[in-house]
Image (tube, rainbow, N blue to C red):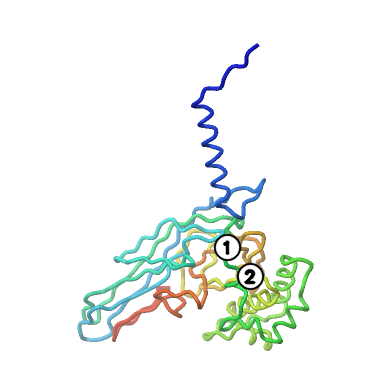
Amino acid sequence: MKRKKTPLFVLISVMALAWVSVGFLSDQETISAGTVLPEYNIPRHIQYSFTVKNTTGRLIKDAEFWTYGPVKQTSTQVCENIKTSYPAEITVDTLGNQVLHCRFEDLPPYSTKIVTVEAALMLSDRANPLSMADTITYLGPEKYLESDDAQIVQKAKELTGNSPLKTAEKIFNWVSGHIQYAGYLSNERGALYALREKKGDCTEYMYLFAALCRASQIPVRCIGGYVCPSNMVLKPAAYHNWAEFYDQGTWHVADPQKKVFMKDHGAYIAMRIIDPASKNEMGDYHRFRFEGEGVRVKMNP
């Protein structure tokens, strides 16, 4: 019996599909056989606002205001949309930080402007594959992150596990168990301060965890944002810092101050990936900045 020939258009279609599939997977360097593709399936809506005030009795021209929107994409979040009540330009830096920029041509004497930001995001409860080409960026010392200090290096050696993941976990457990929460500190003190004094706020917990991991050759980045288990109006007092370490092709949450390690990913919304080497219009400001003599800005409670 003769075999029935497969029509040419079917063969072409199958070959094209195979080529597309191979091409897609080659671009996803962290996806291996049997790995589930990234999923961002938790919708989240956040809102926050600022009051921009002219504190003088004269007209102020060309005042400016900048703030962060949610990070464009991380292993656990995708920012789908940002809306503002006042016209704003949005720029995205190389890390995915989104900066909102408002210009006020005229601010009448003693007037106020309310700038409201609304963002729609899709979150994930697990860390999705997210390749990183340059791990060296997240291995070296920085301001407040003294990973090359002898005391940091020695403590990192004491906490070495039998794998990078086990080392990160041992470091996390030590930091969360040995550092005392001191309440909000207005000035950053850094990793070495936290190690010596055994106290600090969420920022010092973050920096110490990051410094110890980097001293152990585990890539870590520092994050600023909010813990949002539901749709929320963000408050200034709720701003929080935590870390993310890189292992097995993606970034994982490590929040030693709240004792959260590789879980509750869907509750964390990153507003800023902190990296002194990355340049954007916010400069060294964490939440917002403004220009204009006589202008004052505050995040609304």
Q: Which residue bears the numbered disc 1?
A: 132
Comes first in the chain, label 2 or label 1: 1
Quadrant containing the N terminus is: top right
- For the C terminus, the quadrant is bottom left
Which residue is nearer to you in this view: 289 or 239? 289
Asked if the residues shown at circle 2 and circle 1 are in contact, with their CB atoms under 8 angstroms apart, the answer is: yes
Q: Which residue is depicted at the point 44% across and 79% down?
A: 285
Check disc 1: other Cα within 10 Å, few if <14, some if 14-19, many if 20+: few
Count how many numbered circles sit on residues in the image: 2
- Could you give the CA–CA distance between mark 2 and mark 1, rounded to whole angstroms? 10 Å
Amino acid on which the number 1 mark rests in the picture: Met
> Label 2: which residue?
219
Q: Secondary structure at mark 1?
A: loop
Residue at (56, 38) in percent of width and height: 18
Instruction: Give the amino acid at mark 2.
Output: Pro
Residue situated furthest top in the rendering:
1
Can you give x and y, in whole percent of width and height, for residue 49 in the image?
Answer: 38, 69
- Residues 132 and 299: in front is 132
Considering the numbered disc 2 on the image, is that residue within a helix, a strand or a loop? loop
Classed neighbour count for the residue bearing mark 2: other residues with Cα under 10 Å, few (<14), some (14–19), many (≥20): many
Q: Is residue 25 above or below residue 127?
A: above
Residue 211 drawn at (x, y percent): 64, 78
Which quadrant of the view contains residue 156?
bottom right
**x and y percent of residue 158 in the render?**
78, 78
What is the x, y in percent for residue 177? Answer: 72, 76
Residue name at image x 52 percent, y 58 percent: 77
2 shown above or below 144? above
Q: Residue at x 52, y 75 (%)?
A: 275
Residue 172, quarter of the rendered image: bottom right
In the rendering, which numbered label is found on residue 287? none
Q: Nearer the viewer, residue 104 or 217?
A: 217
